[in-house]
Image (tube, grey):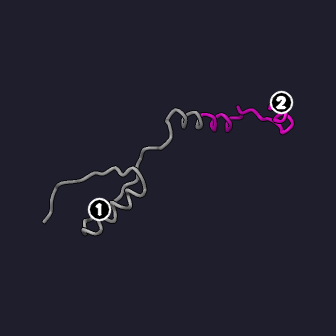
Amino acid sequence: MKTADIIVAYPGSSDNLNALKAFMNSLNIKFEVTPSKESPYNKDFVNKILEGEKAIKEGKGTRISIEELDDLWK
């Protein structure tokens, strides 16, 4: 017997995911796990990091020598 019903679950932790997998396996229910496409990082933060990496590749970064670094913290 087939059913058209689909259940979507959002386990909040790896422990919950493992428990769901064990439960589904114990009932011989076929399932698949699809990795989340959402990043755990704030989009603005990621964009700033990517912009910084691009600037470095374009030679727009600032180099600080070890001596200057010591002076920076004084």
Label 1–label 2 contact, CB within 8 A: no
x and y percentages locating residue 37 in the rendered image: 41, 47
Front position among marks 1 and 2: 2
- In this picture, is 7 found above or below 29? above
In the rendered image, residue 4, in percent from the top left (x then y), is placed at: 16, 56
User: Is 59 included in the stretch rendered in magenta?
Assistant: yes
Q: Which mark is residue 44?
A: none
Q: Which residue is drawn at 34% across and 49% down?
A: 10
Furthest toward the left, the residue is 1
> Given the image, on which type of amino acid does mark 2 rest?
Lys
57 inside magenta stretch: yes
Vertical order, 9 against 26 (above or below): above
Range shown magenta? 51-74
Element type at marker 1?
loop
Where residue 48 sits: x, y (%)?
58, 33
Look at 28% across and 51% down and name the residue there.
Answer: 8
Q: Quadrant of the N terminus?
A: bottom left
Q: Name the residue under label 1.
A: 31
* Quadrant holding the C terminus: top right
Q: Residue 21: which quarter of the image?
A: bottom left
Q: Is mark 2 on a helix, strand or loop?
A: loop
Crowding near pointer 2: few (<14 within 10 Å), some, many (20+)? few
The residue where tag 2 is placed is: 74
Dot 1 or dot 2: first in sequence order is 1
Kind of residue indicated by mark 1:
Phe
